[in-house]
Image: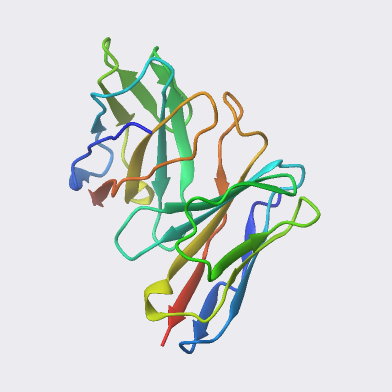
Amino acid sequence: DAKTTQPNSMESNEEEPVHLPCNHSTISGTDYIHWYRQLPSQGPEYVIHGLTSNVNNRMASLAIAEDRKSSTLILHRATLRDAAVYYCILRGNYGQNFVFGPGTRLSVLP
Amino acid sequence: GAGVSQSPRYKVAKRGQDVALRCDPISGHVSLFWYQQALGQGPEFLTYFQNEAQLDKSGLPSDRFFAERPEGSVSTLKIQRTQQEDSAVYLCASSLVRIPPNNEQFFGPGTRLTVL
């Protein structure tokens, strides 16, 4: 699976938007971009995924660059519950296994 | 509805002891994955089952690690002769299918193994 790079940590104030970047310059045409997050003492949970177009769901939005070499996870209004490690993962359409990096640790300040 | 459950949640073993970790996936989920997560790191893939067939065990770190899913539902990860470097959180995940688009993985809370 192609490699992703993310900042080690980010901070946000509560109720403000958060933009979590991910670089994936070696992405292939069939790789999906997945985001998972892991709250303290829990297993990872699905956030969102996309292929080429921007995606929105109840949790977040995913903005994918036109060349697909980077993407941004957008939390529209951060809450204290959003404090977690966020993982950006590439996965091919043949069901390859997830390859997690160290992720971005998001701290949300009250 | 019930999610993925794992037991025990915590396990302390003496070095050299054998341990067995259990995963109950979401009912009807075909795919089951095991991951190992060391402190401060992201999960690392261990092995994958499609129903009862173990299709990929490339991530198992040594022959002391063994996983099974005999009836295509519950899975057990067994570690023989535990070593201190086996201390980690062991995560189980299941998904309805393996290939997109319905391949969201649902993770259990993990089993934290400490080897003394």
Q: Nearer the viewer, residue B19 or A56?
A: B19
Image location of residue B51, percent across then percent down: 74, 45
Q: Nearer the viewer, residue B112 or B83?
A: B83
Image location of residue B114, percent across then percent down: 44, 79
Residue B47 horizontal side relative to residue B54, left or right: left
Q: Nearer the viewer, residue A56 or B51?
A: B51
Q: Quadrant of the C terminus of chain B?
A: bottom left
Quarter of the rendering containing residue A99: top left
Image location of residue A100, percent across then percent down: 37, 45
Quarter of the rendering containing residue A78: top left
Image location of residue B25, percent across then percent down: 68, 52
Q: Residue at x 48, y 71 (%)?
A: B112
The mark tally for this picture is 0
Compared to B38, does A66 lie above or below? above
Compared to A37, does A26 lie above or below? above
Colouring of the image: rainbow
Query: Quick check: can you spot residue B21?
Result: yes
Q: Residue at x 19, y 48 (%)?
A: A9
Farthest residue to the front: give it: B63
Q: Residue at x 77, y 50 (%)?
A: B72
Q: Residue at x 35, y 19 (%)?
A: A28
Q: Nearer the viewer, residue B16 or B110?
A: B16
Query: Quick check: can you spot residue B87?
Result: no
